[in-house]
Image (cartoon, rainbow, N blue to C red):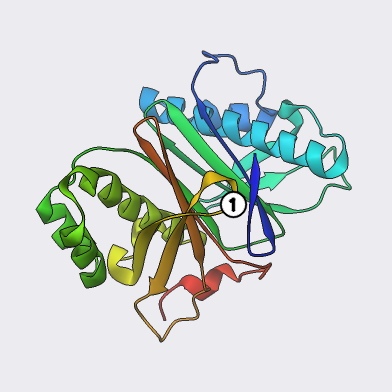
Amino acid sequence: MQFSIGSRPIHWLCEVDHDGDTLLFLAPAEAAYLATLRAPKRRHDWLLGRRVAKRLIHAALVAQMGSAPPLNEIVVARHPDGWPQVSLPTAMNAPPLTLSISHSRDRAFCVLVWGDNEPLGCDIEAIEPRSPGFVADYFTTAEQEFMAAAPDEQRPTLANTIWSGKEAALKAIRRGLAEDTRLVTCLPSPIYMDGGWRELTYRWEVSDRNLPALAGRWREADRYVMTLAATEAPSNFDTGQGAPV
């Protein structure tokens, strides 16, 4: 599925795990990496994320080029610092792309944009209660004020949307939860945008780092919330720019 942020097409897919233990979609290098994962939950999450990511990549390539290699010829490797990197060794004319993967329980959510090293992050969270202590510890002052003004019945959804949006933003700068989550303020809006997604606004809380201007989107479905963060135009982000100096 696809929508746009600014001039940028965003491709996305969220699926429930339903394929059992079939491994036919894995490339040899991926199968070798899977063999190193011992914990059942880690194996499950990794397989689910790769399966949905490859389906998304395949569908986006077909839409862009008219064809795509089979899933076992799409390689989604892990960068040493943790984010996914895509290679298409049998599709030499395929455009470069940036991918983000997230999973929660039995679901995986993936997004991609065309271009190398683009600021892009996504996250999915099951909607569950978040305590006042959680909000006080991890949310910025603006986010805490937003939560205090929210109706009681909306607070679980909004708290998880803010938390998820923060994770998406920190993934977009290739830092993840190595950062203090209060580095960024993330505020969900009820306003619907393209494709049934709602607006999510971002503001970095520091001025001494070269961090990209991000636009966000969020949506709720089946007691899960999905968020994503991206730039409105290609930027070829230097992954070192997000690191503190």
**Residue 51, position as x, y percentages in the image:** 59, 28
Q: Amino acid at mark 1?
A: Asp
Relative to 33, 97 lies left or right: right
Quadrant in which residue 148 is drawn: bottom left
Badge 1 crowding class, 10 Å Cα cut-off, few under 14, some 14 to 19, many 20 or more, is few
- Residue at x-position 48% and y-position 72%: 242
Image quarter of the C terminus: bottom left
Residue 109 seen by the camera: yes
Relative to 36, 64 lies left or right: right
- Residue at x-position 64% and y-position 62%: 117
State the SS at label 1: helix
Residue that label 1 marks: 194
Q: Nearer the viewer, residue 34 or 238?
A: 238
**Residue 67, position as x, y percentages in the image:** 86, 34
**Residue 13, position as x, y percentages in the image:** 58, 36
Residue, far left = 133
- Residue at x-position 82% and y-position 44%: 64
In the rendered image, the vertical position of residue 25 relative to residue 188, given as above or below: above
- Residue at x-position 69% and y-position 39%: 57
Q: Nearer the viewer, residue 245 or 190?
A: 190
In the rendered image, the vertical position of residue 132 relative to residue 107, given as above or below: below
Quadrant in which residue 40 is drawn: top left
Residue, far bottom = 208
Residue 37 seen by the camera: no
Image quarter of the N terminus: top right
Relative to 220, 195 lies left or right: right
